[in-house]
Image (tube, helix red, strand yellow):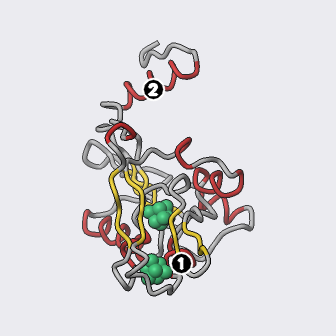
Amino acid sequence: MCKKEAHILGNGCNKPRESCLGIAPVPDGFKDSNWGRPISKKEAYEIIEKAEAFGLVHMIYNSQQDHYFICNCCGCCCNVLRGINKLNIPAGWVVSSNYYAAIDMAECSECGICTDERCQVAAIEKDHEAYRVVVEKCIGCGLCVTTCPSDAICLVRKNETDCEIPPKDEEEWFKMRGVNRGVEFSRYT
Ligand code: SF4
Ligand code: SF4
């Protein structure tokens, strides 16, 4: 959706557009759908691998179950990531992750791939002659880790006191959001 929007508005990028997956809980859930096409599990894996190769961030709902989509998008098209980049929104306000990237400066060969080609939220900066992760901006996606030629980057789990346990399911998540916004939520009313 975000990539399609960006292309319609003339702001599209050259990364794959067919990149987001919907997951139906029943067979043939997308049979006559007009917003996607049914694919095999094998093709779904291929789309995920292609997304990874193009540096697209994998994103899902913020709950332990009830998952019905996997978005794969970039910092220029994704409505969430673009918001972080254009409006300078702190990553933690809109993306929940219990991990952040860290660079071992002794191993870093200063090739710049992590910042020039992989990070979608500008969370890696060149600081004098060294690259470093700006932890407040990092969304813990791991895209920088998988292509570092020197194996100098790894994901680190935050302190347990800073880690968040995602809500059990979509209903619990909506209730939490309602409480945070001062409104009551009921799925059936
Ligand atoms: S990709 Fe790895 S080696 Fe290259 S600048 Fe980043 S941390 Fe250093
Ligand atoms: S994990 Fe790496 S690529 Fe992802 S946001 Fe953090 S620094 Fe950027």
Q: Residue at x 38, y 53 (%)?
A: 99
Q: Give percent across and percent down for residue 130.
A: 53, 78
- Find residue 175 and report its horizontal and vertical position in percent: 44, 21
- The picture places residue 38, in percent across and down from the top left corner, at 35, 58
Q: Which residue lies most toward the right here?
A: 10
Residue named by callout 2: 174
Q: Residue 75 falls in which quadrant of the image?
A: bottom right
* Mark 1, secondary structure of its residue: strand
Local crowd size for mark 1, using a 10 Å CA cut-off: few (<14), some (14–19), many (≥20): some
Q: From the viewer's perspective, is residue 55 above or below residue 84? A: below
Which residue matches tag 1?
130
Q: Decide: is 49 above or below 39.
A: below
- Which circle's residue, 2 or 1, is located before the other in the chain? 1
**On screen, 2 above or below 122?**
above
* Real-space CA distance between mark 2 and mark 1, rounded to the nearest whole angstrom: 42 Å
User: Which residue is at a point 29% across and 38% down the rendered structure image?
Assistant: 65
Please say whether residue 79 is visible from this viewpoint. Answer: yes
Callout 2 secondary element: helix
> Which tag is nearer the camera, tag 2 or tag 1?
1
Give the amino acid type for the residue marked by disc 2 in the picture. Answer: Phe
104 and 170: which is toward the camera:
104
At x 50%, y 65%, the residue is: 133
The residue closer to the viewer here, 126 or 185, is: 126
Is the CB–ligand 2 distance for label 2 below 8 Å? Answer: no
User: As shown in the figure, which amino acid type bears the numbered disc 1?
Assistant: Ala
What's the residue at 44%, 50% (across, down)?
Answer: 33
